[in-house]
Amino acid sequence: MATYRKCKKLFQDATKVIPGGVNSPVRAFKAVNSEPIFIDRAKGAYLYDADGNKYIDYCLSWGPMILGHARTEVLTQVKKVMAKGTSFGIPTELETQLAGMIVRAIGSVEKVRLVSSGTEAVMTAIRLARGCTGRDKIIKFIGCYHGHVDSLLVQAGSGAMTLGSPSSPGVPKDFTKHTILLPYNNTEMLARAMNKYQDRIAAVIVEPIAGNMGVVPPREGFLKTIRKLCTGSGSVLIFDEVITGFRVKYGSVQDIFGVKADLTCLGKIIGGGFPIGACGGRAKLMNKLAPTGQVYQAGTLSGNPVCVAAGIATLKLLKSKAIYSGLDRATGKLCDGIGQALTERGTEHTINRIGSMFTLFFNAGPVTDYVSAARSDTKMYAKFHPAMLREGVYLPPSQFEACFLSARHTQKDIDRTIIAARRAKL
Ligand SMILES: *Cc1c(COP(=O)(O)O)cnc(C)c1O
């Protein structure tokens, strides 16, 4: 029987010096009415907590560890680079290498600016879109998350098509008054909003496959319609691919949906487990950034050699191995197995999956937007999560998150996870 004595103590200690004991809120396990485990180490598909409990990890640091934890090839490169110094604030060849890999992988990206987080990538894209259109308004979809950017921390009001009001204290109303919120997968509402605001929309930002209300794939034609409307009104189309970039295939999901974004935001996987972000697009647009252009953007540790080396090593492995088809197959088997286990138990559920990203919603479904995702039985998830933890399976500690597989998850791991889903006390 797993015990969590040390984890409990570490959490108590942490709460004394860190707000809520965590450095990012969802880690506090509040959404599952529980307390966080504390990790000592990780290798491949497994996490080991401070009490020595081992877990099959389906969160993978919220996506980045697609190759598995502590991947030797990545660590070797990082150590090599680190020995030569960890930050210069002066250009290095490595930055050009990683930028080149991204440019070659994503058709709509000719130039890319590296930053230190997904949030910064989105901030850069938004400012660039506003700067080069001379417009203020941004359209965002309810349930999509784009980092903790002030103007995007918005919640929907009571009306169907609403202007955002801040979803967090500390964000002035003036900062969100230019953010228009619309339901995901709803092309009619989008067309109406674009018509209403005409040439005042600087950008439409979207997760091409939503991952932050749980996984919600775009409906047939949704992304194409956004593209058409943006082109028609001269608005910048921003794809936030901080999760999907290099997750579903090598490069961007734009190829899958036959849609080209004007700006693409990346993060997570391209840092191989180190802090990174990137914003890229056509050269003409990207050159509007300082120093070639007027739109200001900067970062002390941007393009840091350690993060960049980890990113290069990760992308090299992702490119050279047929990882994605294997991940797709394995994740399909896992989802089928979990689905079957829950059906046998008579537990209502819907599993949304694209490639190696998926969410198990305790919800009869279909889950196509925020409203339908929010119908999920979060109390059930709050039982399922700790029960799976006790069975040695680590899932993200909230119903509304994406689960991920890594190239290191084996058939045995999948079988064990399905057995866990059968046995987990609900
Ligand atoms: C994680 C995430 C971000 C924010 O990235 P950080 O590195 O946490 O700042 C932005 N957009 C999406 C879609 C994300 O999933």
Image: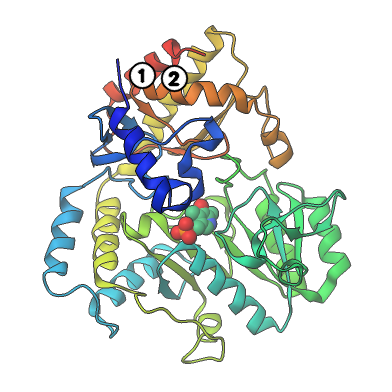
Tell me: residue 246, above or below residue 306. Answer: above
Across and down, in percent, residue 224 comes to: 67, 56
Give the residue drawn at x 39%, y 53%.
17
Q: Residues within 10 Å of mark 1 (few under 14, many from 20)?
A: many
Left/right placement of residue 2 relative to residue 346 reads left
* SS type, badge 2: helix
Across and down, in percent, residue 387 comes to: 44, 19
Name which residue type carries label 1.
Glu
Asked if residue 242 can be seen in this view, the reply is no
Q: Whole-Å distance between the Cαs marked 1 and 2? A: 6 Å
Give the residue drawn at x 50%, y 22%.
384
Label at residue 236: none
Q: Quadrant of the N terminus?
A: top left
Residue 91 falls in which quadrant of the image? bottom left
Q: Between residues 340 and 402, which one lies in front from this camera angle?
A: 402
Name which residue type carries label 2.
Ala
* SS type, badge 1: loop
Tell me: residue 194, above or below residue 31. Answer: below
Across and down, in percent, residue 394 comes to: 38, 31
Q: Between residues 50 and 302, which one lies in front from this camera angle?
A: 50
Q: Residues within 10 Å of mark 2 (few under 14, many from 20)?
A: some
Tell me: residue 118, above or below residue 43. Answer: below
Q: Between residues 24 and 14, which one lies in front from this camera angle?
A: 14
Query: Which residue is under mark 1?
Result: 391
Left/right placement of residue 285 relative to residue 422 reads right
Circles 1 and 2, Cβ within 8 Å, touching? The answer is yes
Query: Which residue is under mark 2?
Result: 387
Give the residue drawn at x 29%, y 40%.
39
